[in-house]
Amino acid sequence: MSKRRSSTPPSSMVSPIHSSMAFRYPIGARSATSRASRADRAEAMLYPRLSGVSRWSRSGVRRPVLLLTLIALVLGALATGGERVDARATPAPLVGLETPIPAQLVAGTTAVVDADGDCLRIRVAPGLGATQVACAEDGSTVTVLEGSVEADGYTWQQVRSDSAVGWAADMYLVPTAPEDPEPIAPVEPVEPVATDPDPVCDTRGTPPGLFGDLPTQGGSALVVWGGGTTAGIVHQAALRGVTLRSVWVLNDAGRWTSYIVGAPRFVNQRWYEHFPGGRIPSPTALFVIAEPPGTGPATGSIALPVTTANAPRHAGGPAPEVEAAAVIVIDAASGKVLHEHNARTRLPPASLTKIATALLAIEGSDLDAWVSADGDYGMLDPDSSLMGLAAGDCFTVRDLLYGLMLWSGNDAALTIARHVAGSDAAFVSSMNAFVDRLGLADTRFANPHGLHDAAQFSTAYDLAMLARYAMTLPTFEAIAGEHSWTTSGSEVILMRTLNHFLSSYDDADGVKTGFTEEAGKTLVASATRDGRRVIAVLLNAPDRSSAAATLIEWAFTDHTWPR
């Protein structure tokens, strides 16, 4: 989220009893301050026409020797650096996470609840699944008791709020300074301890994208894919004005396996068996067949249909009123709108922009590829949310995605954009082409991070449909619902999500928060109960997390789904 949050803690929080959110880096990692400084005819060519054989079921394609030679030549030309070294197999040691966990708050002192305008749930035991015994109001004071335990990605501190005793996530507790602090004794200098060298940052592999001449007039072509998903291949072709009909790859048995664009998943079952999880490694040689211009669907539309089939039915009272400039609640499976207010009004989305940024990276790049940060972030407000990248820092795309989604790193957004598309402008152009293919006519992006730009806008409806698509991707779903992540690149960074909704609503599983002065607090929230997902979007909502929880709970309790 583009929340104007300083990358260095306030001086009042620099003490031995800081909360876990007081510092961006664990003990032993650099501080944010130090880091900031540095076609049919084509099908006939591939296989013979077989009378009575469905287009969807042709198989047993004969392997052309010439094509295999071309594949070897193309791969040889692109393999400039050999195999990547997976340095994450030997990550640098993370200091300060031994068991038992040292308490970050001192027993007998007090702490102030800092829960982004919501109350902080106090549970009978440490863990998100434990029963709630109380909810401490934002800004209230609790007493710190003995006991600190790690569970579900959080450090849980035992506290007393009024007469209730229980466990709360310490990242939402800010310790109060003692009235008469003990003087801190000077620390003798210690010789530096030798540590393992930084992981090898091998960025010489095949870069993201499609390489080769695409058949712009229809027909077939041999290309090489730099990693990602099949949807990413179709999108990259669409950016070059080509609508793909099918994509082919040689499987391990030397036979052709096809992906028919737009066909039901069961038709492409063998493709997904060959590429488990739907991800295609880098580099992969592909044979593509394209539609002649003007004969196929415009640039491969990927808009998810909105249907009444299996849609929930309203069976209760009206939606609760919440304070927000725009609101929408939808059923993710059908796309049915359950409630909306000003949902088609164009407003600044703030860091909800990063949902689109993450999607393009997930679909269009190798998540395990190493990326070296260029450090060119001078256009960013230093008080905006940052992952804390400096020039020369090396992380995988996966690490950068967690920095993008959990910490809402604007520097991570720029680094991802430059890796995937080569430049900020090219990535923004790809973002806009992507939302066009999703049919989101009221969304336009001007940057990949969401800091305010008058030319950047969206609507609650468009953002709900964007999130609906995003949550169909297993990788995005996993990242958007994660509570914490530790990087394994040139720096070890422990990140905990800034999305308070994830820990404040029991069925929450995503997605993203945002904030700028112009946009106010924004939120795309997702929750799943009994296999049914509801998505809510709130724009300029002061109490976004509690409002989202109220709306989603209404959706679950006041609607019935077909069995």
Image: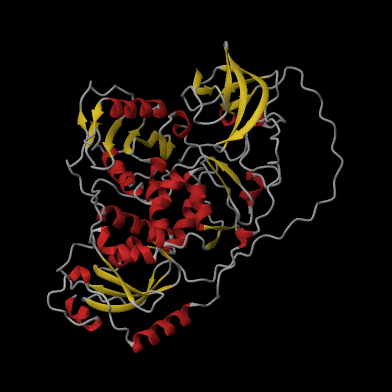
Left or right, 112 with respect to 51, comes to right
| Quarter of the picture holding the C terminus | top left
- Foreground of the two, 324 or 492: 492
Q: Nearer the viewer, residue 398 or 127?
A: 127
Report whether 184 appears left or right of 112.
right
**Residue at the outermost left position:** 52
Asked which quadrant contains residue 421, the reply is bottom left
Please give the name of the residue rendered at 58% of the width and 40% of the height, measured from the top-left corner.
7
Observer-nearest residue: 131 or 442? 131
In this rendering, the answer to whether 285 lies above or below 544 is below
Q: Residue at x 29, y 32 (%)?
A: 326
The answer to whether residue 137 is seen in the rendering is no
Left/right placement of residue 196 relative to residue 157 reads: right
In the image as oriented, which residue stretches furthest toward the right?
188
Image quarter in which the N terminus is found: top left
- Relative to 389, say whether 53 is above or below: below
Q: Is residue 495 above or below residue 339?
A: below
Dividing the picture into quadrants, the one containing residue 166 is: top right
> Which percent across, then down, holds residue 527?
37, 35
Q: Position of residue 429 (x, y in %)?
A: 34, 58
Q: Residue at x 63, y 54 (%)?
A: 38
Position of residue 340 measured from the top left corner of the image (x, y, whole percent): 24, 31
Which residue occupies the extreme top position in the image? 163
The answer, for residue 495, to whether it is visible in the render is yes
